[in-house]
Amino acid sequence: MKIDKLEVAAALAPALVLGALGLALGGIFWGTLEGPEREALAAMLAPRAALVFLAWMVAAIAGGVVAQRLYAAHVAAPKRLAEAAQALAASRTTSPAAREHGADDPQGEGRALAGAGSAGTRALAAVLGELVRQRDAYRDDIDGQVREAARGIDQERSRLAALMSELTQSVVVCNLDGRILLYNNRARVQFRALSNAPALSDGAELIGLGRSVYTVFDRKLVAHALESIQQRLLRGAAQPSAQFVTASRAGQLLRVQMAPVRDPSADEGDVARLSGFVLMLENITRDFEADSEQDRLLHGLIEGSRSSLGNLQAAVDMLELDDLDPAMHERFLGVIRDEVRSMSGRIQALTTNASQGLKTRWPLEEMLGADLVQAAQRRIEAQLGVRTAASEVDQGLWLKVDSFALLQALGSLSSRLVDEFEIKLVQLRLRRDGGGASVPGDTPAAEGGAGAAAPAEAGTERATLDLIWSGHNMSTETVMSWESSPMTIGTETSPLSVRDVVERHGGEFWFQRERTRHEAFFRFLLPLAQPQEALDAALVLKSDSRPEYYDFDLFRASEQARELDDRRLVELAYTVFDTETTGLDPSAGDEILQIGAARIVNTKLRRQESFEQLVDPGRDIPPAGIPIHGITPEMVAGKPRIGQVLPAFHAFASDTVLVAHNAAFDMRFLQLKEEATGVRFDQPLLDTLLLSAVVHPNQESHQLEVIAERFGITVVGRHTALGDAMVTAEVFLKLLPLLADKGIHTLGQAREAAQKTYYARLKY
Amino acid sequence: MSYKVLIADDEPNIVISLEFLMKREGHEVSIARDGQQALEAIRTERPHLVLLDVMMPFKTGFEVLQALRADEALAGTKVLMLTAKGRETDTAKGLALGADAYMTKPFSTKELAERVRQLLAGQP
């Protein structure tokens, strides 16, 4: 038992005090006496010294006992009470057994608090005990409610998951960082078509919980779509959604419909606050190609034939004249023979050869013209720092545009104006074309009447979008050369030119001056769309309650701008991998035979998002190893080489932390291929062997089988790369809480601890 | 009255007919086979009217038209554009850039002759 030093001091204090007091008083008294008196007193006291000492002893012991009691009651008891109360306050849960015991005994846990002490202290202990009991009751209540709510959410989720998997449309739900929170099987199939190496990684490098959709879609394109949704929300549209078409890196054309997920915690008035978005994807590559091909044939026939027909008609007209001399007659007949021949040839060529320069019809979205102008103004001001103005905008015009490309075109033209002519202000003008409002220019435009020159026929309505600036006389050649060069704004470049963008719209583009106003402008002719959303306002009025959304807590898991090392282990995504090799020494020519990898997201092993690939090693497989890894030369014959597999695996592992058992071994194989394949595995790396040594420093073996057995993990498919990767992943998941017990919570801490182990010192 | 007419087209088969037609109307005809030649011919010969094809090598008809309209000295030159491109957007562009008339192939030579007569007589 521990000796309380203060208590001992308290018990001894009266003895010391009495002794000191006696000596002090005796000293003073002695000082007042004369010599003879002193002698007399000494003679009186000397024989009774034992009696005096005894009296002091008795008084000291009595005093000591009293002091010790007082100490126990007023110092030690409150202190113990405080400690016990602290322990109770810190305890997260009280065991049900303790609480049942408490029910028999009115003092309950308070009993642990009671014991000795003054009456006041005992009363205090009783009150504390009561508070603890109340707290536990509340806690139980809350736990119950939480369990109930969680059950409800689980049900909602599984219902939603069932619904999603039945959908024939592919759906991907993301949070605002573009991390995938939910996807259905259809989406997975679709993403597979987008993969650069579909046969190798099955698209799993693109789609997976926690992965970023920006590996598939241009981040700026998504941001642009979100922005236009927010604009529509602010305008009060009931079902705002945006649509865009994008070409994937693998050349596939996707039509994407985006719907917002509003932030359920946003204020009632703050309608435009989003917590994520839903993407519905449609692969339109095939439709589009078919359409384009048809279009091209039609286009070629029309444009090509017009000219020939023109020549024919003119020649025939001439032949009908009666004042024709025989020589001219023969020449016109020659023209007719020639044109007939060339038209037949053209039709022949068109039907046989179907892959020449084609005009494509890019799928366009419908957008309110005023929104486009506003977006262009914002973009130009933000990127170029020049002033913009909307000089005249027809508020009712709906356009059919590829707004992303068109904004790029406007931005890049403005950027040229600013860079090359130091223009300080650009204006935008949007009008219906040909509706009587003729351009006040100095170029006299003759009114229609000539052939098909009537500008605005029914069904071919267009809008003119002008980018206007004033001052500076610049040459037409300079300005028009901007039309065909690639668009650039600052560091942002596009492979497209303004001409390409115009052609996507089936529109036109030119440069025009208004000398009288000292202005010049670029004009885009753009197709019009039917006005829409007229019904939306009515819908908004009817539905005053906000739509309900599923409450995914993943939505809240926003990425924080923290260094990876500071991120908590439980919130990171991992690629746990293993390799099978021809031998142990990559520098002596041993090669990888198989790579297997599993993903961990949100501390869950995602078995369906795995990677497994046999690799043709390009050399023989030593027979000694075949019983271990079970990979025969026949199995790898015709499989891809490491040069193809590593980029696919690298893409699969992007944005994650790598985990392997005895990682140094596998990493040596990967690193030796860095130069040849051009892929570098520079992700952070964790080694389950070292982490196991961190949590169980006294264990002798940290072999994978042994650790798995220690954790009670059933081992199936050991010694295939994926089988081992799965086991490693499960071991890793078991290690996480044990690491936490050791105070290792972040990636940085885990790496540091691993480096310090005996095994690490041995190896590195 | 006789006018100078420039035919700018790279297709000989239409040039034959246009040349014959214009000469028959009593005009003095010159011919340019591409956009560059056309612009030079306009500057040196100062034709009253240009029959201008859109699709030509070196310079398109639109470019020739823009250069022509940018030059004050050539302000009086009438331009009739001929094109095999039938889209309304092309027509709109041609007229906006300053063409006096615009005809899409195939066209009737009677109408063409009539348009030329109107333009040269100073009518719209």
Image (cartoon, helix red, strand yellow):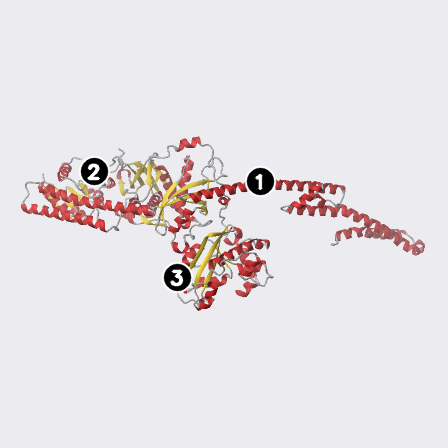
According to the image, label 3 marks what residue?
A641
Q: Which residue is mark 1?
A: A145
CA separation in Å, label 3 and label 2 = 61 Å
Q: Nearer the viewer, mark 1 or mark 2?
A: 1
Q: Specify the amino acid type for callout 1.
A: Gln
| Label 2: which secondary element | loop
- Residue A438 lies in what quarter of the image? top left
Q: Which residue is mark 2?
A: A452
Pick whichever, B19 or A418, lies toward us.
Answer: B19
- Say yes or no: labels 1 and 3 on the same chain: yes
**Viewer-proximal residue among A729 and A499:** A729
Dot 3 falls on which chain? A
Could you give the CA–CA distance between mark 1 and mark 3, rounded to whole angstroms?
56 Å
**Relative to A689, is A432 on the left or the right?**
left
Determine the chain carrying the residue at label 1.
A
Q: Position of residue A733 (x, y in %)?
A: 53, 54
Q: Residue A128: image x %, image y %?
A: 69, 42
Q: Position of residue A115 (x, y in %)?
A: 74, 45
Q: Earlier in the sequence, mark 3 or mark 2?
A: 2
Residue type, mark 3 in image: Arg
